[in-house]
Image (spheres, rainbow, N blue to C red):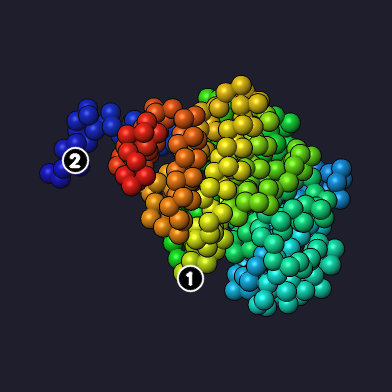
Amino acid sequence: MSFEKILNKSNSYKFYKNNYLSLSEKINDYECELKNLNIELDNLKSDLDIFINRLIENDNDYQFIFSVIIALYNTELYLKDALDSIINQSFPLDKIQIILIDDGSTDNSKKICEEYMEKYPNNFVYIYQENKGQANARNNGLNYAKGKYLNFLDSDDKLELNTLKEVYCHFIKFGEEIDVITIPRYFFGALNGPAPNSEKYTKNRIVDIESEYDFPQVAINASFIRSDSLHEKFDSRLVISEDSLLLNKTILNKGKFGVLGNVKYLYRKREELNSTIDTKKTQKEYFSLRMEIYFKELINYSSEIYNHVPKYIQSVLIYDLYWLFKQKTEVNILSDDEKKEFYNHIFDVMQYIEDELILSQNFEESVKKVMIKFKHGECDFNGL
């Protein structure tokens, strides 16, 4: 006698058979219901797209919705990738302004810019200037901006193609509560993978810097800003961190910013290590001048608004101080007197940072210990 026949005579077989049939019918019903729900969901998404497109079409408060300002210098190898990532956005091109400030390029960057100018005359502005630095170039770009929202894309980077649409929709959703929306950065090129803090972009939401203070924002290229909230320009005395200074001043004014987890800023890491951040570390202005104009200015500005230095600003300071402590050998370009001045600035800044906040950071314990020791005067300059 077969196994099936044996089971067929047992009560257990009938029980399982009856329940199998019953469950199969329920699953079939649920699958039909799910199919109907998916059809309904697709219809709702289609309706939403129509409303979004109508909303964008009728948003005429400004000549453009987005002004993307690109300061460029000798990036002919990457410039087309950057520009194509804007003009191919899932967002109406007639609502996008691209402002190209050529900071004295000596390669074929100008020719590339002129090609795009000729092809898209209503969207592009091209300005050539003598080399004055990224901050000056971006400030020059602001003079021509006619968009509701601003972005400062680097000329060797890219935006995912749905970025502008998602950013726009969430400015609408978040309302006047925020002036800044940031998106996660992902490396490509010589290095691939998520940049620091990208794991915190888990969902689209508003971040309150008082309660979620360990979420420092330092990259204006991966940020979008309401143009009417930008009350000053980049400090052109800085060779680096001018973007972090302006970005965080803007965030401090409302104490909140938006984050999106469903788009990416694609940040190119070059093989030749000649990007702005790579080259500026070899200039003396990167040290004491940066401590005075960037670090101490953030301390003073936040103290004026909050009557203390918020933990959020402390986190921003720690983020940048970490790299100074970790890459301390680069101070060898300074004289002994310049080193002393630089370390005195660091000591002053660190008096505004809580030990517990340093110790809670997710980086090497050895670096944390040195930072704490230096803050409390327990190691001299050579100890670094």
Q: Name the residue under label 2.
A: 5
Name the foreground residue: 273 vs 329.
329
Q: Is residue 39 visible?
A: no
Mark 2 Cα shell of 10 Å, populated few (<14), some (14-19), many (≥20) = few
Q: Where is residue 279 in the image (x, y as percent from the top left)?
A: 52, 63
- Residue located 50% across and 54% down the image: 186
Q: What residue type is labelled 1?
A: Glu
Residue indicated by mark 1: 272
Taking depth in this image into account, of 24 and 102 the one nearest to the observer is 102
- Residue 17 visible somewhere in the drawing: yes
The x, y position of residue 116, in whole percent, is 76, 71
Which residue is painted at 84% across and 67% down in the image?
Answer: 121
Instruction: Residue at 65% x, 67% y: name it.
Output: 73
* CB-based contact (under 8 Å), mark 2 and mark 1: no
Can you say whether 173 is above or below 325 in the image? above
Q: Residue furthest top?
A: 307
- Side (left or right) of 57 relative to 234: right
Residue lying at 28% horizontally and 32% vertically, measured from the top left: 16
Q: Where is residue 207 in the image (x, y as percent from the top left)?
A: 58, 31
In front: mark 2 or mark 1?
Answer: 1
- Residue furthest left in the image: 1
Disc sitting over residue 180 in the figure: none
- Where disc 1 sits, the SS reads loop
- Distance between the alpha carbons at the discs numbered 2 and 1: 75 Å
Q: What residue type is labelled 2?
A: Lys
Q: Could you say which is closer to the camera, residue 60 or residue 268?
A: 268
Q: Residue furthest front?
A: 337
Callout 1: 10 Å neighbours few (<14), some, many (20+)? few
Element type where label 2 sits in the image: helix
213 relative position to 118: left or right:
left
* Residue 219 drawn at (x, y percent): 58, 48
The answer to which quarter of the image holds residue 99 is bottom right
